[in-house]
Image (cartoon, rainbow, N blue to C red):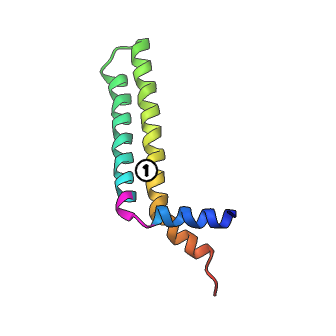
Amino acid sequence: MTLKNRLHKLAMKLGNNPRLALLKMIQGGLLFAFGSLMIMVANRVLKDSIQAELIALLGLVIAGAGVIWTLVGYLSMSILRLYNMINKKD
């Protein structure tokens, strides 16, 4: 199978379900908010210690995962449109 066929199948698979893509965006946003909240709690509520730093690090990892998950959802929503624009034959 050629690369073009694989990209076409991936675009069709990701782009044909906008409800799932929107759900991924919402989940990623909530995950980012939870990670940011963990960082704020570690910074403002907990006293300075190694435990607070580890909680902040975990919050940073969770927030980063949320950003990536949101990006996947956004790209899933727009990938079919982008694919059609690139392969448009006028």
Q: Residue furthest right?
A: 2
x%, y% of residue 69?
A: 45, 47
What secondary structure is the magenta-colored segment mainly? helix
For the C terminus, give its image quadrant: bottom right
Q: Residues within 10 Å of mark 1 (few under 14, many from 20)?
A: many
Element carrying mark 1: helix
Quick one: 67 or 41, which is closer to the camera? 67
Q: Residue furthest front?
A: 1
Determine whether 32 is above or below 88 in the image: above
Decide whether residue 35 is among the magenta residues.
no
Residue at image location 66% in from the left, 67% down from the top: 4
Quick one: 80 or 12, which is closer to the camera? 12
Quick one: 41 or 14, which is closer to the camera? 14
Q: Residue furthest top?
A: 49
Residue under numbered circle 1: 70
For the N terminus, give its image quadrant: bottom right
Q: Is residue 55 left or right of residue 9?
A: left
Residue at image location 33% in from the left, 24% down from the top: 44
x%, y% of residue 68?
A: 48, 46
> What amino acid is labelled 1 in the image?
Thr
Q: Which residues are magenta?
A: 16-20
Q: Is residue 9 left or right of residue 24?
A: right
Residue at image location 36% in from the left, 23% down from the top: 42
Give residue 77's quadrant in the image. bottom left
Determine whether 29 is above or below 81 in the image: above
Residue at image location 43% in from the left, 27% down from the top: 58
x%, y% of residue 30?
A: 33, 44
Determine whether 34 is above or below 17 in the image: above
Q: Is residue 74 left or right of residue 10?
A: left
